[in-house]
Image (spheres, rainbow, N blue to C red):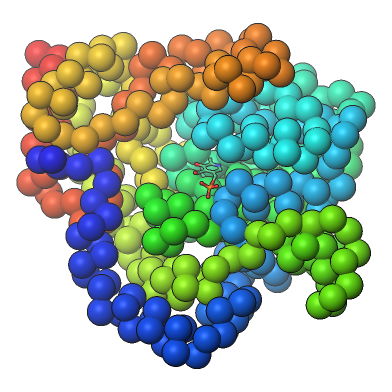
Amino acid sequence: MGIPLVDLKSEYLELREEVLAAIDDALQSMQLFLGPNVQALESEWGQFCGVEHAIGVGNGTEALHLSLRAMGVGAGDEVITVAWTFFASIEAIIHAGATPVLVDIEPDYFCMDPTALEAAISDRTRAVMPVHIYGHPADMDAIKGVCEPRGIKILEDVAQAHGAKYKGRAAGSIGDAGVFSFYMSKNLSAYGEGGMVTTNDDEIAADVRMLRDHGQRQRGTFECVGYNSRLDELQAAIVRIKLRRLAENNEKRRQHAALYDQLLQHDEIITPKVASDCEHVFHLYTLRSRRRDEIAAALQAADIGFATHYADPPHKSPACAAYGLDKANLPVTEALADEIISLPMYPGLTESQIEQVAETVLSALN
Ligand SMILES: Cc1ncc(COP(=O)(O)O)c(C=O)c1O
């Protein structure tokens, strides 16, 4: 591929010696079960996010599911979220035994619309799950303003926004709990599966710890039916290496985004907006254009990677249709599905590659 959407191989080659040494250390120690790397990563990630507890789990989907269970969400409850997300956000609500209720997003940052949220609250609403999509935080104060007076829990889905900030606070430290994925393409990633829950709530933290390890608080005592969803020691060792570079890499992503913004000034393109009180981490750099399909064709012809998350929003999938979610009234979500396109974005992207991508995009419109 000429310019890929993400370049994981180059990143690996840069980190190879460190990664192989860390894996070897872990294997030599044979402490592979919730061992020193998991414990160190939990402490380092908790510090990075400014929260009291960080709990490593098997992946982001399980982090959502276990957090919902730890918040007491179950059968008969409704959890409000958005359809402008990866399928897992909705899937986790169903795994918890609750009913997903989908609300629309606002058109500027593509995050949960607090007015739509308020209109969807019912006496069964137990939790709300805003998704900080593409790396931009949702409007947490407005969401808290709706939830807190009603005693509704907030679970932030931060799977795409490691290191993003809302009014100076880390995404994942603002609601009752936050959930991260270390899937390989994320801003902070493993070379396999991994996830993390962050919270300042002692009870949620204790319950997630119990649930991830077969319902045990003490080894051998199964207090409830839990899960086998522990963060793997080797993956934790890898994530720790990458965490040391996360802030710098997020800064590079912001610089790349600024260059794209500058080069892509065109009246048929809307470049990503950033709220004045937020720090975006550009997990994805996503444009809006009515001529999306022409842009996609030009990129394809030039061998440049792109993606269209979420041209098929998850609520339209057969799995969600089985729950009637395809009938949700989501006009902004559905309009965006035909207009969005994500361009190559990763820390190692060069200026000349960005120029080449921008030229190709503009060539489709002129
Ligand atoms: C918004 C969102 N939520 C949840 C997940 C699930 O994370 P994982 O793939 O680690 O299960 C992902 C990513 O894959 C995601 O992008």
Residue at point 39%, 74% (across, down)? 241
Number of numbered markers = 0
Which quadrant holds the C terminus?
top left
- Asked if 224 appears above or below 262 in the picture, the reply is below
- Asked if 125 appears above or below 179 in the picture, the reply is above
Residue at point 32%, 78% (across, down)? 20
Image check: 48 left or right of 344? right
Q: Position of residue 43 (x, y in %)?
A: 60, 77
Residue 240 appears in the rendering: no
Image check: 295 left or right of 282? left
Which quadrant holds the N terminus?
top left
Res 44 → quadrant = bottom right
- Asked if 291 appears above or below 282 in the picture, the reply is above
Q: Position of residue 179 (x, y in %)?
A: 62, 52
Residue 14 appears in the rendering: yes
Residue at point 52%, 86% (across, down)? 30
Image check: 272 left or right of 224? left
Question: Along the line of sight, which residue is nearer the eye, 329 or 267?
Answer: 329
Res 291 → quadrant = top left
For the view shown, which residue lies furthest in the bottom direction?
Answer: 29
Image check: 81 left or right of 13? right
Q: Position of residue 233 (x, y in %)?
A: 53, 74
Res 73 → quadrant = top right
Residue at point 87%, 23% (across, down)? 122
- Asked if 21 appears above or below 310 in the picture, the reply is below
Question: Along the line of sight, which residue is nearer the eye, 257 or 314?
Answer: 314
Q: Position of residue 80 (x, y in %)?
A: 73, 30
